[in-house]
Structures are given as C-alpha cells and as structure tokens.
Image: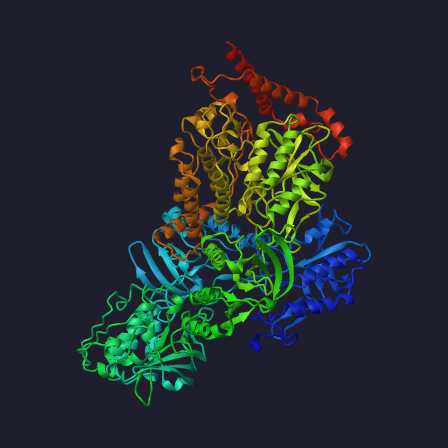
C-alpha cells in the first residue's frame, strides 16, 4: 500500500516530489489544458514554449511562458549597444511558481524583471530560440540567469527574453553578485573618503585600498573607526607589546542587507581591541599584521583560527594603533574563547553552567546516576553533541512493547519534549518535540547501578570512539568502579541476536548470557550490554543514546535510544536509517517460497539461494517471474541459440522505498527478455549463464553497459528459460546499447557515419582519411562528431585574433554541430552555433604537423580542452581552417586586461585547477602540448572561471618529437628545448611554471621588460627566471612555481604531483575542507597575506616593444645543432622551410590582391590579410620573418659545406 500522505489528491498517483508534494503529471496536465488560452501568433514559437512547459522536471522550476507585452509597466531602457538592448520593467501578474502547501501554480505579482532583445536578430530564428538554452528555469542552478519566458513588442515586432532582474538601477551595470554592485559601492566609498581620516597618509591609503578592493557583498567594509566610538572598555590580556581590550562599538560594523540593497550597521557590537604598542613607529609591520585577519563575513567553522577584522583605530593618548576585531569571547561570561565563526558562540563552561542550573528539575535521587549524567554533560565539546539527560518517565507517550526477554524489555515510545539539539540559526539549544525513541529497559538494574552505567558508557564509547578527549572513550571494555555495588566488569557477546530476542529460549541462561559468575547479583541481572556487532563498520547500526530514565513502578533503569528496533521481531534494525531488518526480510522470503515455483527444483533452489543472500535493502531481489506478467512482447534480435525481446513487466521489479520504509514495485517496467533456445534440457548451462551475468555486476566498475538482471521466467509453449534483464537493447540493430543510461548505440552510429562517407569530401584524400578515422573512433555519446564543414556554412565572420601562423575569426555555423539528444535518443544539430575559425597561413599543401594538431585535439576532448568540431577550407585562398569552440571571453591576456582588479587569489587558484586538469588530460594520453602559454588559454564564459587549453599546434605522441624546429613564445619555452633537445612533458611543466608566474603577478608576462632575442634565450638556458616580489606571493606557491621551472627537467614535478599541491592550496584557502591540519592553516595564512597585498597593488606593467608573445620559429635565436652531433639537416626539408618563409613574405606583400578576391567570395567578411596587413606586424616581427629566411639559407650552406 502507498502512503496517502505521498499520494497526489488530484490524480491519486505518487507525488513526483514527495517532500514538496509536487506532481509532474498534474502540473503538465494543467499546462496542456491551458494551451488554448494563449498564443504568440507564431506556431513555431508556440510549439517551442509548449515543449519547454511539458519538459518541466522539478517543483522549483519556473514555468516558461508567452508573456503579453501589455503585462509590463515602467519600461526603461538601461543598456543599448551593437548586440543587445536591455530594459528594466515590472511584470504585473508575475511568474508562475509551484505552491507546496496547496499543490497548485500561483503567481508572484509586481515582479521586477529585465527585457532583453538581440539587435542582430530581429526575426524569430533558431539562433534566437537556442539563446533561451543559455538561461535557466531553475533558481538553484548556479551561474545562470533565470528566464521567465518570451514576449514581443506589438508595434516594433521586436522579440524579448524576459529575465531575472540582474542590473543595478543606479548605474545600469550588471550586479557583481546577488544584487550587489561593485561599481556603485566603490563610488560610495570614494565619495566618503573626505569625511574621515586617520591623520596618517599610509594608513588612509591602506584603508581606501581595502574598501576599493571589495569583491563581494560578504566582504566586511574595512574602516577607520574613531576611538570615541568605543565604550565599556575592559582589559582582557596584556603583554609588553600588546594589550587586548573588550569594548562596545556604539555604531557597530557595516553589513550588506540584500533587502535594503545597501549597508546597515549592527549597533552596540561587542568587539576586541588589539592595541599594538609603539605601532606609530612600525606602521609597515602593523599593516602586515592586519593582512593576517579575515574580511569576510561568511566563513566555515573550519576557519576558527582566523579572526575577522572590522578596521583600525588609534588610542588618542599614546597614539598606539588598534586592530578592531570580532570578539572571540563568550558574550555570556565574557571570559572564554569561542570560535570565530559568526554563527558559533558556543562557550562550553557557560553551556555546562546552563545545564547545571537545570539540575534541580531532573535530579534522579541516585547520586551515582546524577554524577554520571553531569559528567557526560561536562564532556560536551561541539554544538552537534547530543546533550545526555535524565528524562522523566512521564515524558513518554504511546509506549508499546516490542520484545522482551528475562533481562531486557524493548519499547517504542514518543518523547514529548524531545532531545536537545543545537540550532545554528538561533544559536541556542532547542528541543525536537514528539521524537520517536526506543526504550531499552534493563530488568532489576536498580540493584546494580554500576553495571547499568557501565553498559551506558560502553555504548557511548561505541558511538563516539573518535573523541580522544573523553577519558571514558578508551579501548578497555572493562569499566572499574569502586562503588558499593561490587565488581562491574561485564563480558559482552558480539552476537546481537542474543540481545533481547523474545523468541530465544536460552536468552536468560547464565552461560549464554556471559555474566560474571563471581558477581552474586548476576542471577538477577542477566542483561547483555552490547547492541552492536563488533565487525560492523556501518554507522547506521549504531543507535544514538539520548539519556537515562526509570520506570516509576518497577524502578528499572532505562536507556533511551533513537528509534532503531524492528517492531516486527524486536531486534535492532540491520540498517537503522532505512529501518530495514535483514532477519525479518529473510523470514518473509522463506514464508513466500510456497507461493511460487518454476517447477524445476534446481531453478527454485537457485532463486531461493539468491534471495537469502541479500545483505542490504539496496540489493536487487532476484525472482521467478511468471510469463503472463509480460505484455507488448516484440522480437528485436535473434541468433541460433538466443532471441532477444523487449516487453513490459506489468508488476515490475521490487525496490525498497526509503520514505515508506518498505518494499514496493515499479509497475509497467520496460524489460528485455533474453530467451535461450532448448535451455529446458540444459538447466545447468543456463544457470551458469545467469551466474556469469550476476558476477558481472560485481566485476564491472563501469555500469554503462551492464544490464541488471531481475530474475528468470519460462516460455509456456517452447519451455525455453528466459533471463529478465533491464531494458538495454537497441531496437534498430538489436545489439546491447553501448550506454544503457542514455540508450546510445555505438555500432549504429558508426554504421550511419560510414554510410555517409559518400556524401562529403574535402577534395584531399589525406584529410578525408583523417576525418573518417576520427569519426570511427567516436566512443562516448557526448563526443564531438568531427566533420568536414563546407565553407559556405559560415556567416557573420569577424576577426578576433592573430598569431604567428594563423588568424582567428568568430562565425556562425548555420547547421551547427551534431549532438546526441537525450530526450529524442538521436543525433541532432545545434543550428546557428557560434564557433571560432582558426585559419592557417599557407596551408594549401596540407602537412603532417597540421594533421597532428587535429588528431591531438580529437583525442583529448575534455571540459578543460577546447572542443574541435572539424575542418573547413577557404575556397579562394585554399588555406585550411580548424573549426573550434568559441570562447566567449577570449584568451588569458585579453581577460586579464578587463579583470585584473578582481583577479583575487580564490580565482587564481581556480584557474590553476582548470589548467592542471587540462594538462593532465593531455599527458595521460602520452601527448605533449608544445606551445603552452597564456595566449592558448581561453575563458569560455563571462560570468565564471571556466578555462580551457587550446592550440595544441605541435602536439603528437610524446616519443615522436621534432628535434629540428623550435616554435613557441620564447619566455614559455623550456631551456632544454631552446638548446634543441627533445620536447617532453617536462617542457610543458616548465611552461606551466611560467603561467603560474603570470597568475601570481596578476597578469605580468614573463620577461616583459626586455627584447625576446638570442640574449634572452641564453639567459633562460643559464638559469635566469622572471623577477617577482616574494612578499606578495605565498611561499608555498613560490616553491611549486620554482620547481616547475627548474632548469633540470628531471627535477620538475609531474601533473599528478602538481594537482595534489594545488588541491591543498584550494582546500586551505577556501576553509571548507573537513579535515584541516596545521599545514592548512599556515597555507591559508600565506594566501590571506598575499590577498591583502594584491588589494593594495593593482598596477599593471608596461611591455618592452621587442617582447613578442606570439608563437614563432625560434631557431635563429638559439644555438644551432653541432656538426659533431651527426644530426645533418635534410636539404629538401630546409628548402621547404625556405619556400614557406618566402611564401609568407610574398603573401604579406600580395595581401591587397588576396583581399579583393576574398571580398568577392564572402562580401569582405573573412580576410586572411587585410589591406594594411604589414601594419599588423611590428618591425620586430618582420625581422623575425627575415631572420627565419636567413637562418634556413645558412643551414643549407653549412650542410652543403
């Protein structure tokens, strides 16, 4: 039976979301019925909106709508640029939400919203509708704006996205986060600079820098606080150099109020004043100490060693400067230290005193019991400790006996007041009333109090065996007490079945009970104190103990536990959380054996054995399933010995419902029937097949292609036995899905791709073979289908970047890439996809290096590697094009120019994590990047740190390196490569070290103050590295960076070692790692100090005019190969390179001619070189080209000599 509480009152089916009482069926039915009440007057748009509504999956999802334009009031334009126009408005009716209470859709009227139109898309197109998917309808999805629907201006016919209000009304800029505007807040601080001064310019500059470097609404506005703001000043502690005071700050600190959209003060705040003697003469040291404190309101309890700082003050008489800190003393006693977490004001002595004041209300009258409870309460160390109590028996209602034995009786009951729990929101202990509990009554326990208390203590030790501070949590099972009740040593049976089972006749025997034969009271006190199996590590077996009570009639003492005993057999649940009892489950199986049979003893025994081997309620229940349970049976594959059918199992498989705490069935479940021909005559062989399949569940870590087995059936006519499997066979080819979860079939995809080979060609067999090879290597449903993409598929081309060997454009790909649709279970295209086109200069004659780049890309597609969609070719210039994912925010160099002020250490660590993950993906495939620098690091999105690595232009197998030509950005190239040694993965690590420098310095490029010529190459090879201020970078960070750029490749760490250290940085800095050690606090301190320096120094360096950060041939600037090496240069290859150099120069000279040709083809949208191409290359770059030519000529001459 299904619980009525979990059943929808309208359709009488189970809620989709039981907790919120949300029924998807009813909501979608309501929306369908409402389709007739609205229309956009555009069938395509109506269908789109209807589909969005019917795809709603969560009770918190916003219902996407067509919103009539007359619903909007107070429409005001706030932004208008080439791409978009943004308006603010008020939506009269407001969006639809699900009301959990009444289980219906309601509106929140007068909602502030944003109307966004796309200026470049005035018509309803696929691209416009695709833009909808960049927003979210779920308010809990991070980093996405909410979208409520679509509207249209009836006069201009302009379409709008109706979005969450995310723009500041004061400056019309997008909120920095959660309705907090960095621009407006910093302007307010600036306008207030004239209203305060410390009297010291260095102090004033420091405070102003702190205020202007705030990044978030949770940051504390750092202030100059006049000393007359403090009263009730008391000395707490004093030394020769420092005096600590407590005080009341009259106005109190500023804190951002999201409702008021501004800062409010918390008046009469208790603070600590740390007065640094003689600070006037040591201002730099004083400010360095300020940097060790936190300016974030919200920190986790793991960061309790770092105090919050509100600002600086000065004692007027001595002129000593004062750090104004959050008080870390208990507000009740004003003496004891508490955590620095703002929600944690727990003072252990005060809590104990509070409990002591309540002692009079619970005195039991037995001094030992009272002392024991008080001792347990005194051991409380954390808020989440259970407060062990004396609980009056009158507190229990609905007492029902579960089981009984000679020594123990178990009851279930409801505790009226309930246990004491710490409420973090109110910062007080609160009771959870009407809590279901288990009462374990130990018969005649009042006779031997010591023995009873020993049982309680042993249970407490089992629950809290990780608490080293408590003396009773030792490893000795024996508890000594010299009281008058005699020896309290107790032997404990590890078998929980002997605890209190009412069915166990021998439970009361001395020999089975294990009582101490020397204790005269044992005869009357035969209870077993051990409730838990010693070898069970599952915490769900351990019952929390709330306290002690006493039956007023029998005077027996009672241990009060969380609800954890089976009401059916009276024994403790095998899984307490799931309220599942293994023994009762096995008994149910045994009782049910008589209700089914396969009519074959071997098969019956096999099924029974599998059922009785269950150990967990999550285990699958293997069954005999009558054939008449199946309907809609269809054959999908057949061989000589096996036939596969798909069918619907009417009752469906058994599963344990965690909410209902019982077994239920998934009705009308799709299954596969694997029918073995003539298996009735070879039962043993058939059962071996079943065993092998069951064993596969344990052996296969990847369950994407393992099909669960539900049981066995038999065809009534042929008598063939059937394995009933999870539905996982492709209906098209009859083979098992490659990925059962998404119903994706690789063989079908490969067959489709092969059959499509005849429908396209690049005109070059080498390119065609490469594309076909990559397509046939597609192994996962979310892989990119690599394609040949005709050039006429691209629109709206705009130049976005240029490198040493290519130019990059953004473009719209009309058809768009192929993607596997999880709903439709087929490959569909994403039309009007914005992509990047990397056009390679002089690539008409395709070479292996180019193909290596393509192959490396296709073999290394992950989240942190730029996706590649395929290859194209400009029909006019004949140059090949790599079509890749468009990174919205450009490369690292461009991104840092716009974001350096906000590039805090949290973001810096996040970037490093993305980069090392991407480099790990490359190195795991035994590849090397070979051109790893900031220009090849791209930022995908505007509003989040989402970084990927691009341009593996010289990537190949790690053992297959080009020892002759060195290409790259000189400061990022490892010294051994500059010495023309093989390029290895260690060289990538060197480049990573240089990127770490770029990150640590907030965007300063390595060696930006000198020409990138042969002198720099020699210096790099001799050990010179970029200069930096060590005081501004964490010591731990410097250590890793310097290891990465070590001159000896063998001493550089590998990617796994680097990832481990960066993870340590992240765990330490973000203060949310569960198991912080001292080293975490030291690392956290270093990063906090560096963050303070960063806030005070947002200057950017200038770059030397001959510092070149584009990839180029570097051989002219480095030592050439020695003749003694025996490494002769192939004249034909040098001739090729010379030809390339000549063509490159000639191409630049003839750029005007090329431009005119290309303009005719593409209306001037794409140009390999514009009319002023030579102006794009500075004198240094032109010299490089000529130097390459001279170098190649000289190499030919030397080799000929």
Q: In which quarter of the view is residue 341 placed?
A: bottom left
Q: Nearer the viewer, residue 896 or 400?
A: 400
Q: In the displayed orientation, state which residue is furthest to the front.
A: 681
707 vs 362: above or below: above
Is residue 383 visible in the rendered structure shown here?
no
Tell which of 590 and 63 is nearer to you: 590
Q: In the rendered image, which quarter is residue 348 located in?
A: bottom left
Q: Nearer the viewer, residue 889 or 927?
A: 927
So how many labels did they put on this image?
A: 0
Residue 203 seen in the figure: yes
Q: How is the image coloured?
A: rainbow
Image location (x, y in percent) of residue 769: 63, 33
Q: Quadrant of the N terminus?
A: bottom right
Q: Residue furthest right?
A: 155
In this view, which residue lies farthest toward the top? 1201
Q: Is residue 3 above or below residue 51?
A: below
Residue 624, percent from left and from top:
52, 67
Write down the quadrant of residue 394 in the picture.
Answer: bottom left
Q: Position of residue 1021 (x, y in %)?
A: 43, 26
Compared to 436, does 975 lie above or below?
A: above
Q: Nearer the viewer, residue 222 or 123?
A: 123
595 sits to left or right of 783: left
Give x and y (percent) for residue 1032. 43, 43
| Residue displayed at 41% across by 85% down | 399
Residue, x 33% and y 86% (percent of image)?
551
């Amino acid at each position: 039976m299904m619980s009525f509480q979990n059943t929808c009152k309208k359709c009488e089916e189970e809620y989709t979301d039981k907790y919120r009482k949300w029924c998807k069926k009813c909501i979608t039915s309501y929306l369908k019925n409402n389709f007739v009440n609205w229309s956009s007057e555009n069938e395509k748009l109506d269908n789109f909106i209807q589909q969005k509504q019917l795809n709603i999956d969560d009770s918190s999802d916003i219902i996407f709508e067509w919103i009539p334009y007359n619903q909007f009031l107070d429409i005001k334009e706030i932004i208008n640029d080439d791409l978009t126009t943004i308006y603010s408005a008020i939506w009269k009716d407001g969006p639809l939400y699900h009301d959990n209470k009444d289980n219906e859709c309601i509106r929140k009227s007068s909602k502030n919203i944003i109307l966004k139109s796309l200026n470049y898309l005035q018509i309803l197109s696929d691209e416009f509708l695709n833009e909808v998917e960049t927003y979210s309808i779920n308010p809990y999805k991070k980093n996405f704006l909410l979208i409520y629907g679509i509207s249209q201006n009836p006069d201009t016919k302009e379409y709008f996205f109706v979005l969450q209000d995310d723009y500041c009304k004061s400056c019309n800029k997008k909120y920095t986060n959660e309705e907090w505007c960095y621009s407006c807040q910093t302007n307010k601080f600036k306008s207030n600079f004239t209203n305060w001064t410390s009297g010291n310019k260095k102090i004033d500059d420091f405070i102003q820098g702190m205020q202007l470097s705030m990044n978030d609404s949770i940051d504390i506005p750092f202030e100059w606080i006049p000393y007359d703001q403090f009263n009730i000043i008391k000395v707490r502690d004093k030394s020769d150099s420092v005096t600590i005071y407590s005080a009341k700050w009259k106005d109190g600190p500023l804190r951002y109020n999201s409702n008021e959209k501004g800062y409010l003060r918390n008046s009469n705040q208790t603070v600590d004043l740390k007065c640094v003697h003689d600070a006037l003469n040591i201002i730099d040291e004083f400010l360095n100490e300020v940097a060790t404190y936190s300016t974030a309101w919200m920190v986790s309890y793991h960061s309790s060693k770092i105090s919050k700082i509100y600002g600086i003050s000065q004692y007027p008489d001595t002129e000593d400067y004062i750090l104004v800190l959050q008080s870390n003393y208990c507000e009740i006693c004003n003496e004891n230290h508490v955590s620095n977490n703002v929600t944690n004001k727990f003072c252990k002595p005060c809590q104990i005193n509070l409990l002591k004041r309540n002692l009079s209300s619970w005195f039991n009258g037995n001094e030992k019991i009272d002392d024991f409870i008080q001792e347990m309460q005194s051991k409380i160390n954390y808020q989440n400790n259970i407060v062990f109590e004396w609980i009056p028996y009158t507190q229990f209602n609905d007492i029902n006996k579960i089981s009984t034995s000679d020594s123990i009786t178990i009851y279930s009951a409801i505790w009226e007041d309930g246990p004491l729990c710490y409420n973090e929101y109110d910062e007080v202990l609160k009771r959870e009333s009407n809590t279901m509990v288990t009462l374990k009554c130990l018969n005649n326990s009042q006779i031997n109090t010591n023995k009873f208390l020993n049982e309680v203590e042993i249970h407490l030790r089992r629950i809290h065996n990780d608490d080293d501070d408590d003396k009773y949590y030792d490893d000795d099972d024996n508890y000594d007490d010299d009281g008058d009740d005699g020896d309290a040593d107790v032997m404990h049976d590890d078998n929980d079945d002997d605890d209190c089972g009412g069915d166990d006749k021998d439970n009361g025997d001395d020999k089975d009970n294990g009582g101490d034969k020397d204790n005269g009271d044992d005869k009357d006190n035969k209870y077993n104190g051990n409730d838990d199996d010693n070898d069970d590590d599952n915490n769900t077996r351990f019952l929390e103990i709330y306290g002690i009570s006493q039956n007023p009639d029998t005077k027996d003492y009672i241990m009060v536990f969380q609800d954890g005993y089976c009401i059916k057999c009276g024994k403790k649940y095998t899984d307490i959380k799931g309220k599942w009892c293994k023994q009762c489950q096995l008994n149910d199986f045994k009782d049910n054996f008589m209700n089914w049979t396969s009519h074959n003893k071997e098969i019956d025994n096999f099924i029974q054995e599998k059922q009785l081997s269950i150990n967990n309620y999550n285990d699958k229940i293997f069954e005999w399933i009558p054939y008449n349970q199946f309907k809609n049976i269809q054959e999908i594959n057949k061989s000589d010995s096996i036939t596969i059918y798909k069918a619907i199992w009417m009752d469906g498989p058994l599963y344990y419902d965690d909410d209902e705490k019982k077994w239920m069935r998934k009705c009308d479940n799709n299954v596969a029937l694997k029918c073995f021909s003539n298996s009735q005559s070879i039962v043993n062989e058939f059962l071996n097949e079943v065993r092998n399949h069951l064993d596969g569940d344990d052996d296969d870590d990847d369950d994407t292609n393992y099909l669960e087995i539900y049981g066995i059936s038999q065809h009534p006519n042929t008598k063939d036995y059937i394995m009933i499997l999870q539905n996982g066979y492709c209906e098209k080819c009859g083979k098992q899905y490659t990925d059962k979860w998404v119903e994706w079939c690789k063989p079908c995809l490969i067959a489709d791709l092969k059959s499509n080979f005849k429908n396209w060609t690049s005109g070059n067999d080498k390119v065609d073979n490469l594309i076909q090879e990559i397509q046939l290597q597609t192994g996962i449903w979310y892989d990119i289908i690599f394609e040949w993409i005709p050039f006429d598929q691209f629109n709206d081309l705009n130049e976005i970047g240029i490198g040493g060997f290519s130019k990059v454009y953004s473009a719209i790909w009309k058809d768009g890439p192929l993607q596997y649709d999880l709903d439709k279970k087929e490959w569909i295209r994403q039309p009007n996809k914005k992509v990047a086109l990397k056009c390679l200069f002089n690539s008409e004659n395709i070479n292996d290096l180019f193909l290596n780049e393509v192959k490396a890309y296709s073999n290394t597609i992950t989240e942190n590697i730029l996706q590649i969609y395929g290859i194209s070719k400009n029909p006019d210039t004949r140059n090949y094009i790599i079509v890749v994912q468009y990174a919205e925010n450009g490369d690292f160099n461009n991104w840092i120019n716009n974001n350096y002020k906000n590039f805090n250490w949290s973001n810096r660590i996040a970037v490093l994590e993305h980069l090392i993950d991407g480099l790990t993906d490359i190195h795991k495939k035994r590849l090397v990047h070979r051109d790893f620098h900031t220009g090849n690091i791209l930022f995908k999105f505007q509003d989040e740190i989402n970084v990927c690595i691009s341009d593996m232009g010289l990537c190949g197998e790690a053992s297959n390196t080009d020892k002759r030509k060195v290409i790259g950005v000189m400061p990022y190239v490892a010294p051994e490569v500059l010495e023309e040694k093989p390029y290895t993965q260690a060289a990538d690590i060197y480049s990573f070290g240089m990127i770490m420098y770029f990150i640590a310095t907030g965007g300063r490029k390595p060696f930006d103050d000198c020409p990138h010529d042969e002198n720099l190459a020699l210096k790099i090879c001799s050990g010179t590295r970029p200069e930096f201020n060590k005081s501004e970078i964490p010591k731990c960070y410097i250590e890793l960076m310097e290891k990465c750029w070590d001159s000896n490749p063998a001493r550089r760490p590998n990617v796994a070692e680097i990832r481990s250290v960066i993870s340590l940085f992240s765990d330490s800095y973000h203060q949310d790692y569960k198991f912080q050690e001292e080293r975490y606090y030291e690392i956290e301190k270093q990063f906090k100090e560096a963050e303070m320096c960063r806030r005070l120094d947002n200057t950017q360096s200038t770059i030397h005019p001959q510092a070149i950060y584009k990839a180029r041939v570097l051989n002219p600037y480095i030592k050439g190969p020695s003749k003694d090496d025996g490494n002769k240069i192939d004249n034909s290859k040098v001739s090729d390179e010379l030809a390339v150099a000549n063509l490159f120069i000639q191409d630049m000279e003839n750029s005007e001619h090329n431009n005119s040709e290309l303009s005719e083809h593409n209306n001037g949208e794409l140009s390999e070189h514009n009319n002023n191409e030579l102006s794009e290359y500075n004198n240094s770059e032109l010299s490089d080209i000529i130097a390459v030519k001279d170098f190649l000529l000289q190499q030919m001459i030397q080799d000929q000599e």
